[in-house]
Amino acid sequence: MFYEQQKLNRLKWKPDATIKNLGMTAKFKEGIIEDIEKKLADNTGIHYQLLDYGLLHIERKLPFMIVYRPEEDSPKDSVIENLLKNEASYFICKIHKYPEYQSLLKKLVKILSDEFGAFLLLELWPGATPAVSVTNVAGFCLFGPDDLPETAAPFRKNLENMNLAGLKPEVKLDTTGKRNLPHLQPLLETKDLKRLECLLLGLEICPFYRSRETGNVYPLLERRFYSEFSEVFKKTVFDFVKVQARNSISSFQILARRELIPKIWEIDEQLVEIDKRIKFLMLVSPVNGAKAWNEFKKNRYRQVPVFHYRMLPDDPELLKRSLYNIRVEDIDDPTLGFLFREKRAETDKMLTMLIERESPDFFYGSLQLFGGVGNKLISEAKNILDFMPNGESDDNRGGEYYNARQFARLAKEELMFLSAQWPGVKNHVEIKNTIDSMMVDKGVFYIPAKIRISKKRAEALIQHEIGTHVLTYYNGKNQPLKLLSSGVSGYEELQEGIAVLAEYLSGGLSRARMKVLAGRVMAVDSLINHHDFVKTFEMLTAEYHFKPDEAFFMTMRVYRGGGFTKDAIYLRGFLSVIRYLKKGNPLEPLLIGKIRQNYLPVVNELISREILKPVSIIPRYLTDADSLKRLSLIEKTEKVTELINFGI
């Protein structure tokens, strides 16, 4: 409920007040200070619009504030202003108005310094544009007291380590005691700083982010600067508080903004809405797989089969237009802006692939989306295949089977297990005649009508499809950000890696299954090396001893659409998850939604900022004693083949 209320509050956000009194009379000032004291005591947000281009914003009790005092007769520097607005506590005030607000700032510093035991003030201002162009340098000057605390020293080092798209940050240090431009009134006098236990720093920033000729901002450099500076500043505050303040803070990410502009939620919904309309996997999967197999067999495995696909329900070019009408550039939050831009770029590539379906260019789009196969992955796949005995696999030697309806009942029982944890889970399973393999799309589990599932493998497949793909969809759906349910950019590799892990944890990762995962890698490698369908099929049957029907459908998956490298991500993702777990990392955070493994720091930041919440739904394999025992054994394994549950 807390997170839903947070989202509601953000949607309804309005300034607390607009100060219209030019003189800031004593009576009015007293009323403002009383209001601020009350809000800080309640740890609620403050946002005042001050007269003549001024803003006072404090989200909650925090041990810092950034200040910007633009010149009276000069245009504001939008980059400096946005650096402030990326933070949770800032004060913007025209220079000629500052004397009227100095006592207000003093009061704020006292309240927050008393709360934390120390306070950090940072004033930013733009420096002059150099008369001569300095190539590849981003210039800064850090101003501090002559007895600059050691806790502030990392600020300079972190500034110098910023990644600014090829520019080298150079930071001069001035500890003469001056912490503002010569013609400016100090933010606070030295005696006040000591009394209030406040460290005041000044940072002059050379406008390297603007063209010397036109004055226009370089947009990509600007975006990178926002992200890099925000992290550097929060780490500086964290180091300062850790030593100087009495209130401990567990992570620098806790200092980040939590309030989000309504535009963020609109863009999130718009991106997800376009993603819903694409149904990418369904549109690149053949509808005549069984018939094509019969024709291929009839032609004695010598003629390249012809595949047919569903008609595109939407014009991809019109969807692209809608996609780029979404104003992601308006997002002022570096982390969320990054997530949205990455997703938009991926969606654009998918739409291009739909346009190029059944053409050679489709293959190159697939390489961009899913990557190829490196030497290490090929080596792992060959090791697995060498480890496997030749001949028919254990999964297909007699035994009992479920048909589609019986397997659907098992799936629905598992969905009930998930819905007991969160009622938003829908019990939605469909049996379809037009698909050849199981798939999950937007939380719906699709089962081929003619499928036969070995009872030994049934639970593993349930945990693969329901315990991973459906579960992460609903865990994402239960988050304020809808993107976590539809999937961030590049989420598939981690998804499939966890799904294969779920098969192992449920005791159903068989010899035959591992052989298929390795065979898919070799089929993708054959595709990348420009071998045709028939040659890849022959490799799988002759060299790796797959049965003809297995080899056909494996090859079909890889050659569909014009060449689809996605099938390599199953083994690659599984190996990546195993490496992650062998380091002692927990599995549960990976289930928060459809995320990428290297996005975990982003997810953790958003949880710290209370934008995301922890995982809501836990899979059965994390509640079962046998599964947990298998999980604990992963750290001791030397080879991935040691994780095969049966059939050796």
Image (tube, grey):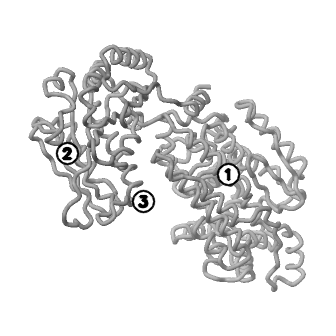
Residue 99: image location, x then y, percent: 23, 28
Q: Residues within 10 Å of mark 1 (few under 14, many from 20)?
A: some
Q: Residues within 10 Å of mark 3 (few under 14, many from 20)?
A: few
Going 75% across and 71% down the picture, which residue do you hit? 546
Going 66% across and 53% down the picture, which residue do you hit? 500
For the residue pair 275 and 157, the one nearer the viewer reads as 275
The quarter of the picture where residue 210 lies is: bottom left
For the residue pair 20 and 329, the one nearer the viewer reads as 20
On-image quarter of the C terminus:
bottom right
Say if residue 574 shows up in the picture. no
For disc 2, the marked residue is 142
Say if residue 616 shows up in the picture. yes
Name the secondary structure under disc 3.
helix
Image side of residue 117 versus residue 429, left or right: left
Chain-order first, disc 1 or disc 2: 2
- Distance from label 1 to label 2 (Cα)? 60 Å
For disc 3, the marked residue is 220
For disc 1, the marked residue is 645
* Nearer the camera: disc 1 or disc 2: 2
Chain-order first, disc 1 or disc 3: 3
For the residue pair 150 and 225, the one nearer the viewer reads as 225
